[in-house]
Image (cartoon, grey):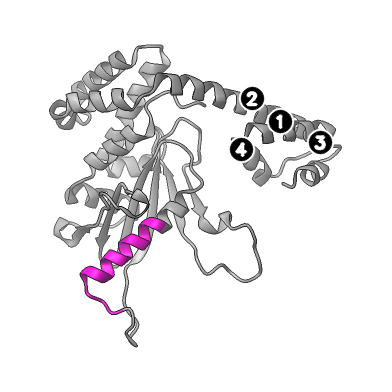
Amino acid sequence: MPETTIRRNFKDWLFRHLFNNKEDLLMLYNAINHSSYRDPSLLEITTIDDVLYMSIKNDVSFLLGTMMNLYEAQSTYNPNMPLRGMFYFSRLYSGYVKTRKLNIYSSTLLSLPAPRYIVFYNGAQEEPERFFLRLSDSYVEHSDTPPCLECIATVININLGHNSELMKNCRKLYEYSYFIEKVREHLQKGISLEHAIDSSIDICIEQDILSIFLTKHREEVQQMILSEFDEEFHINWEKRISYMQGRSDSILELLSELGNIPEALRIHITKEEDVDLLKAWTKAAAQASSIQEFQSLTGL
């Protein structure tokens, strides 16, 4: 299903603004970890606002107890989140060591908080309730020896109707997802972007969904969405996604006539965004006499 709402920058901006205080972050942390922390002062915000190194920013990061937490919002499926996470954590731990004046050359083992990387996904493409992305999946060569570097992102689907227990335990996360869904619904009906924003804000305020935030920041929210939305990009992207999905469906339909399609192969084909590669796979699927032959022809 193509993305029919706003571009990712606005969603990231909104997520950061909604969870930029310790009280709401603590509620979100408790909902994810089934914990019951009550004192927001225990939480130390470490968000990277602007880093010259590779010009990276992260959405929200914080220390709590023995955990270094990194939270990111994503409106599109991105298999490279673990690589981004590695960059973020490198900077976060560097800052941790520096601010605490730890000696990395000491003969005594340093005590460090354990990393926890959560990606909140609310794009229009259907994804599981929860799944994992690993940096090691990007490595070209694999051997029996485990790679010396790993970063695992836990991806949580926060589209409306998903992960209901988490939404129940963190009201603000639910309200964030509800607002995004309302904008999406209005756009799918063919309503102009400006009207879709106004109507969505009105509905949310009436239903006490982010009412204080949207009342206070209404103009800022409107301008942010309008400035981030590129109509030509949106139309072209929808056409591209529709084309790719049609190609993927054709390949899977051809392969289904050859036998049971392994789930890993099905996911790989569905996720592929290279149009030329999809064309080649379609040709291979039409020529193959078995699933194994298709995999041999394509290297999958």
Callout 4 crowding tier (Cα within 10 Å): few <14, some 14–19, many ≥20? some
- The picture quadrant where one finds residue 263 is top right
- Cα distance between the residues tagged 2 and 4: 12 Å
User: Any magenta on residue 242?
Assistant: no
Tell me the residue that label 4 is attached to: 272
Residue 217 left/right relative to 136: left
What residue is rendered at 49% in x and 63% in y? Answer: 150
Tell me the residue that label 1 is attached to: 279
Relative to residue 70, is residue 146 depicted above or below? below
Query: Picture coordinates of residue 55 (x, y %)?
Result: 34, 49
- Cα distance between the residues tagged 1 and 2: 11 Å
Residue 181 left/right relative to 258: left
Q: Are marks 1 and 3 in contact (CB under 8 Å)?
A: no
Foreground of the two, 106 or 82: 106
Magenta residues, start to end: 87-103
The amino acid type of the residue labelled 2 equals Gly
The amino acid type of the residue labelled 4 equals Glu
- The picture quadrant where one finds residue 192 is top left
Which residue in the rendered view is the most extreme toward the right?
Answer: 289
Q: Who comes first in sequence, dot 2 or dot 4? A: 2
Tell me the residue that label 2 is attached to: 246
Relative to residue 227, is residue 147 depicted above or below? below
Q: Nearer the viewer, mark 1 or mark 4?
A: 1
- Cα distance between the residues tagged 1 and 4: 11 Å
Q: Are marks 2 and 4 in contact (CB under 8 Å)?
A: no
Tell me the residue that label 3 is attached to: 258
- Cα distance between the residues tagged 1 and 3: 19 Å
Q: Who comes first in sequence, dot 1 or dot 3? A: 3
- Circle 4 — which element? loop
